[in-house]
Each structure stands twice: as structure tokens, then as C-alpha cells.
Amino acid sequence: MLETSARLLRLLSLLQARPDWSGTELAERLGVSTRTVRNDVERLRGLGYPVHATRGSVGGYRLGAGTSLPPLLLDDEEAVAVAVGLQTAAGGSVTGIEETSLRALAKLRQMLPARLRRRVGALQSSAVRVPADAPGPTVSAEVLTVLAAACRDHERLRFDYRDHDGAASRRIAEPHRLVNWGRRWYLVAWDVERQDWRTFRADRVDPRQPTGPRFSPREPPDDDITAYVSRRVSAAGWRYRARVTVHAPAATIAERIGPAVGTVEPVDEHSCVLDTGGDTVETMAVHIGLLGVDFSVDDPPELVAYLNELSARYQRATPGPPAS
């Protein structure tokens, strides 16, 4: 049986791991009686931890949030994970969080035991970030907080929005999810006036307070919301679009492309249509050729012309058939 002090730490760790526990579950995990669990809960309350009793057929416990909640109990791997996360956030895409992350990291390092402090220190001193080719967009932590809260509470958002050309518009939307892709943050929401799903760049959103009335959540546009965003964002930036008939099963082609490349629609057991695009026809031709199967393209004419040019070039690059 665990000693009292060790058992209290173990109990606190369990209460932090998930929202609700029954007294019986905690007793089994700790190897004690439910009466001992009740006594240990009282000890935690005496130390300032707001442990709430829940009603029900078997009763239970929940660790509440409070303004004077003592420090979290982290195991070794959790402490290292938090330190790495704070270090990464210090150089991320959220403005105003860099200095805060470094301050939190400094406090965490002071509380770590020597063995963990060495691990975190080695990572901090040895790991360097490769700078981006171009400065990426940044979004304020305040804006992200407003958007995330509206998603959680199902509250309508009113905001000013700038599109990629800089044109401003006023939007009213029912927010669904925030998606982080690289250095960009996107808000997936139902546009009330346009009556359709839209994907908004969070760094172009200027929320207006207060948020609007609550709404009943709609069915999302896709079960995989990250794939949905990557398709929409990629397609919005394409200069050329093409529907390519591929002579291979849809499942085979779907395994070879990511959602940012395009979508695959089955035609029959042996063929499918790839809806794709790109900034240049040269890039599109390379990607389609890398599928490794036969295909046919009718549109756009620029892509057809370039494929014919490639075909002639490749034929000139190989020796002709041997003379008979």
C-alpha cells in the first residue's frame, strides 16, 4: 500500500487525468478502501485543491478549477512535453505569446528536478529552427481565444474580414472549428448571409464584441475537417484546374495523393476522375505523371498543350527503333 504522501500525489494525478472518477474506481487504482479515498480527498481540500463530490448511484469526485489552484502535478514525460511545447510556441505563429511562453518555460525549468532540467536544457541549447522562406502570417492570441470560445459555446460571430486581395467585408458566421495548418490558422464556419460553409484565415479576422446569440450546431461539411480545409485552401490558390481521367481504381489513386492535391471520384472498377489544380501547368504535369498509371486530359488547353510538348521532348530524348 502506498504511504499517505505518495498516495495523495497519485490521487491528485488521477483526478487531473480525466474529469470524473467514482470512489470505487479511485480505491481500486490506489489499492485502498473507499473510506480512505474520502479521507484523502479531505486532505487534498485542506491543501487548497477544489475536489468536488458528484452525486449519483455510486457517487464520485471531480477536480474543479479555481483561481488559487496549486501547481499541476506532471510526470517526467509530461513535464518534458510541456517544456518542448512552450519552446515551440515561443517561435510560432501567434503574436504576443513569445515572451509569455519564455517566461513560463523559465518558471517550469526552475521547478524541474535536475535530471529533467538537463534534458530540457539540452534540447533548448542544441535544437535550432530553420527559418521560413518568407515571413508567415501571424494571428493574435486574443483573436484565437475569441474564435475558440465562440466555437465552444456555439455563439454567432460578427467580424470584419479582409480577403487575399485586401477587400474588406462584414461577416456574420456560426463558427465550427479552428484548424492550424503550418503557420496559418483557419476558421471553418457557416456564413449566415451566404448560406454556405466558408473557410476564413484567422489573421484576416477582426472580431466584433460582444458575440452574437447561441445557435444549434449544423452538420459539419466533412467528417475530416482538416482534409476539408486543406482541399479548400489549396483549390482557392490554384491558377489552373483540371479534371483528369485516370485509368486505375479510385482507391489506388486516393492512396497516392494528399487532400491538398485534389479529390478522387470513382467512375467504375478500373477508372476514376481526379479533380486537381496548380499554379502552373508544369507542376500539374509532374504530379499527374508521378501517379504511375495511364491517364487522359481534355482541359485546360494549356495543360493539354504542355503534355503534348513533353511527349515530343521525351520521344526525342530516346533512340528510335533499331533499323530492320
Image (cartoon, helix red, strand yellow):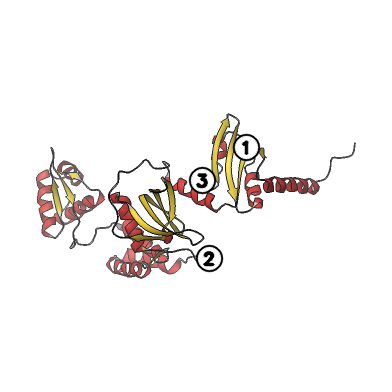
* Mark 2–mark 3 distance (CA, rounded to whole Å): 24 Å
When the figure is inspected, residue 90 is found, relative to residue 242, above or below; the finding is: below
Circle number at residue 25: none
Q: Give the tally of numbered discs.
A: 3
Q: Nearer the viewer, residue 248 or 141?
A: 141
When the figure is inspected, residue 303 is found, relative to residue 273, above or below; the finding is: below
Element assignment for label 2: loop
| Residue 36 rendering spot, x and y as whole percentages | 11, 48
| Residue 109 rendering spot, x and y as whole percentages | 31, 67
Residue placed under numbered mark 3 in the picture: 259
- Tag 3: amino acid: Pro
In the image, is 231 to the left or to the right of 51?
right
- Tag 2: amino acid: Ala
Element assignment for label 3: loop
**Residue beneath the point at 53% across and 46% down:** 258
| Residue 283 rendering spot, x and y as whole percentages | 63, 51
Label pair 1/3, CB-CB below 8 angstroms: no
Circle number at residue 134: 2
The mark nearer the N terminus, 1 or 3, is 1
The mark nearer the N terminus, 2 or 3, is 2
Circle number at residue 246: 1
**Residue beneath the point at 62% across and 42% down:** 291
Q: Nearer the viewer, residue 233 or 55?
A: 233
How would you rate the neighbour count of disc 2 (Cα within 10 Å): few for under 14, some for 14-19, many for 20 or more? few
When the figure is inspected, residue 100 is found, relative to residue 309, above or below; the finding is: below
